[in-house]
Amino acid sequence: MKLLSVDHITINLRKVEESLRFYGEVLGLAHLRDVDMGDHVLHMYQLPGTQLELIEYKEAQKEVQAGNTDVGVYRHFALTTDNLEEVRRRCEEAGWGINMQPSFIEQLGARVMLIRDPNGVEIEIVEK
């Protein structure tokens, strides 16, 4: 057996409209389709080489927030870019916070920044 690829990444939405604007307009991901699953709607976006599933639940759900150093929880996913400053500019102009400004990380041999989406999900942006 071997794993072949990442099929998709899923985020449960806390802030639906803000999330759709963030992923579609700020990060510039193409919206593929919406799929009504009965109790929730999948908003599908194209990531390089995979898809992003944003889940909008029709009924209120329990909200949970973990900190960056909490153990046993998912931390972030990372995307590469050819223009880290453009990502920073777009996030700042749209009013989305940046957890870590673009910085060169010698151990990684790359410039990185950390942003947070409207749901509190951290995303690392890497420029090699």
Image (spheres, grey):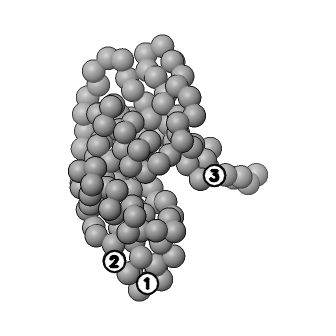
Circle 1 crowding by C-alpha within 10 Å: few under 14, some 14–19, many from 20: few
Badge 1 amino acid: Gln
Reply above or below: 19 against 50.
above
Where, by quadrant of the figure, is residue 62 drawn?
A: top left
Which residue is at the far bottom? 106
Task: Give whichever of discs 3 and 1 has the lower sequence position.
Answer: 3
* Residue 8 shows in the view: no
Q: Is residue 73 left or right of residue 54?
A: left
Q: Nearer the viewer, residue 77 or 127?
A: 127
Callout in the foreground (2, 1): 2
Q: Which residue is mark 1?
A: 107
Which residue is at the front of the view, 27 or 38?
27
Q: Which residue is mark 2?
A: 103
Earlier sequence position, callout 2 versus callout 3: 3
**Residue at the image point whose x is 29% and y is 25% from the top:** 61
What percent of the width, then of the height, locates residue 121? 33, 48
Which residue does the numbered mark 3 point to in the structure image? 49
**On screen, 34 above or below 20?**
above
Label 3, label 1: how far apart the Cα atoms are: 26 Å
Badge 3 crowding class, 10 Å Cα cut-off, few under 14, some 14 to 19, many 20 or more, is few
- Assign a secondary structure to mark 1: loop
Is 128 placed above or below 117 here? Answer: below
* Amino acid marked by disc 3: Gly
* Labels 2 & 3 near each other (Cβ < 8 A): no
Q: Comparing marks 3 and 1, which lies closer to the viewer?
A: 3
Please state the horizontal and vertical placement of residue 88, each as a whole percent of the image.
33, 63
Location of residue 35 in the rendering, given as x and y in whole percent from the top left corner: 54, 22
Q: Three-letter amino acid code at disc 2?
A: Ser
Q: Residues within 10 Å of mark 2 (few under 14, many from 20)?
A: some
Query: For residue 52, which numbered disc appears in the image?
Result: none
Whole-angstrom CA distance, mark 2 to mark 1, is 12 Å
